[in-house]
Image: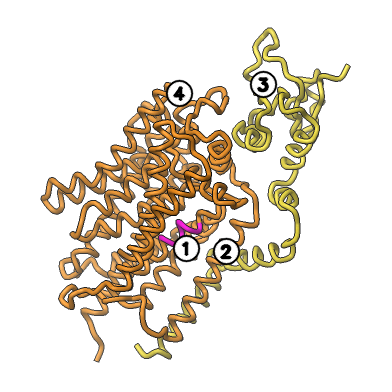
Amino acid sequence: MNPGEAILFGLGAILIALTLLGVVGVPLTGWLAGSVTLAVAGAALTAGLRRASKHRLPKSSGLMASPWRGRLTPAEALLLLVIVLITGVAAWRAAFYPVSAMDAHAYDGRARWIVAERTLDLSIYNTPGLDGRSNLTYPPGYPLSLALVYWLGGTEGKVIDLVWLTALLLLLYDFVARRSDRLTGLLGVFLLIAAPEFWRHASLGLTNLAATAAIGGATLLATGRQSIWRPALLLGLATLLRIDSVVLALAVAIFLALRRRHARTLLMAAPALAVAIGWQLFLKASLGVASTSALRSSMLPDLKLLADATSAAFGAMSRQELYGWCFAVFGLGLVASVRRWRRLPEEVRTLILLVIIEFLALLVLYQQVDPAFGGGGGSYFANSLKRALFVLLPAAVAAGLLAFAARSADDPRP
Amino acid sequence: MTDRRAAGVVLILLTAYALNPATGSWARSVVASARQMYRHRNSLRDTRAQSLLGEPWRLIDEVRRSTPPDARILIPEGKGADPLSNRIWCSYYLHPRRLVRPSEITGDGRPVVDFVLVYRGHNLERLGVPADSIAGTESRLVDLRAP
């Protein structure tokens, strides 16, 4: 387990513990949150960091033993400096400005209500017309993570996004660097943090960035064959942050079970399903509503949305003001690897296919979402799909870079 | 690749990123954002909100200062009334005041509201101003409790 993974699992464990305590009616106080945070995060971080520093891999694995040690080269130092500066400005913005994004008020408002009222019970909000489509009725993972900041004495809950972001960047770096070299790992981190709209989300207080950390992390971990439970738990965490993540969890589990001809892999979706079903039961009991009301009845496929979304993400003129060069790197890596597909490492092939599967799953999902809530067919830019695609960025960057790295390893120059 | 060549490649990459129209404009906005925050580093939270949200913030602030916590306020609705037409957005600042949308008022005038939030001409018709004279830029808080 690398430091990024340790942070994700630590934060995830805190949120799951607080959710379970809140659902059974335990008052959510600062003392309780502080105790859970100290107990869970302390244990997870200590264990994770100890393992990261002592981890030794057999040489036959083909992975770098530790991308965290050794002196930096000038190129690595330069890239690291730029990454730290960009991330630092995002952190400053998150702490400096109050909540401004429209939807962010629902999450931050709910976090403040949870802190004030000490309960997850939605019926106290006294908001007429509150139904399963409102983001006030999303699972409580993200508002609880914002509430953690308030419980621990912070003034802007959205600074928690920097924890999600840091975990994701560390995880991405470790994944790419172990399979290539440190400079490629840092390059992956730069491409991700320098994706303009994704960077802006680091200071907005919206769910997309946290969900990207959980789903991106799960996708990277799902490519290996070590354990299905690590990606499974992250997919469960992603569903606690955004209910629609359950669709991605199902898509990933089914695809990998078919690809590996291994039925047990289907269990990868179990935590996500448990969270989704559990939260729906709680919603039914407390408000009498369900998240499925955000879906519309029409199931007709919209080819225009497919074409627009594919062009925006993977087209020659991919939307750089949204995704930077992330999808462009993925597209180039894909093109470069087509003729030598069978010679690519299995993990890289799986990663490339997972990006495509997740893209299609999101496309199908957002077509079914009511247009009044950012879904439906028609214009891609009026569709929340454009931000939902953030969850693909870490895997897309890793897949693209590793496809190139495998190519240069195949073709060493004299 | 030698260390020197790798550093050159990274420099070229960063330069290309900064010169690219889309990513370059973002890179400049990162620098501008840092400079803006540094310039206003001592400003109060409300001043920062005002600089981000503009007129809607001025109105919300006026409502917060001028209305009691149990006030019933008519918020605007429809195109061009964002973000004040969003009840969750308004609730974030105005809780526990009761916020009512025009479409929720029935034929018998219920629920009765104490204040009307006029925003860019929205809700002026509720004050008896004829539709053809609605000024699209007018924004203010109207107290209906006053005799």
Find chain B in the image and tell me its colour. Answer: yellow
Q: Is residue B85 magenta?
A: no
Q: Establish whether labels 1 and 2 are both on one chain.
A: no
Callout 4 touching callout 3 (CB < 8 Å):
no
Q: Disc 2 on helix, strand or loop? A: helix
Query: What's the CA distance linking mark 1 and mark 3?
Result: 42 Å
Q: Main secondary structure of the magenta part?
A: helix
Q: Disc 3 on helix, strand or loop? A: helix
Q: Amino acid at mark 3?
A: Pro
Across and down, in percent, residue B27 comes to 57, 67
The vertical placement of A15 against B94, above or below, is below
Q: Amino acid at mark 1?
A: Gly
- Read off the residue under disc 4: A287
Query: What's the CA distance linking mark 4 and mark 2?
Result: 43 Å
Query: Which quarter of the rendering shows the N terminus of chain A?
Result: bottom left
Q: Amino acid at mark 4?
A: Leu
Q: Residue B102 bears which disc, if any?
A: 3
Left/right placement of residue A236 relative to residue B8 reads: left
Across and down, in percent, residue A70 comes to 37, 83
- Read off the residue under disc 2: B26
Query: What's the CA distance linking mark 3 and mark 2?
Result: 40 Å
Q: Residue at left 26%, top 76%?
A: A65
Q: Establish whether labels 3 and 2 are both on one chain.
A: yes
- Mark 4 vs mark 2: give the one in front: 4
The boundaries of the magenta stretch are A162-167
The vertical placement of A185 against A283, above or below, is below
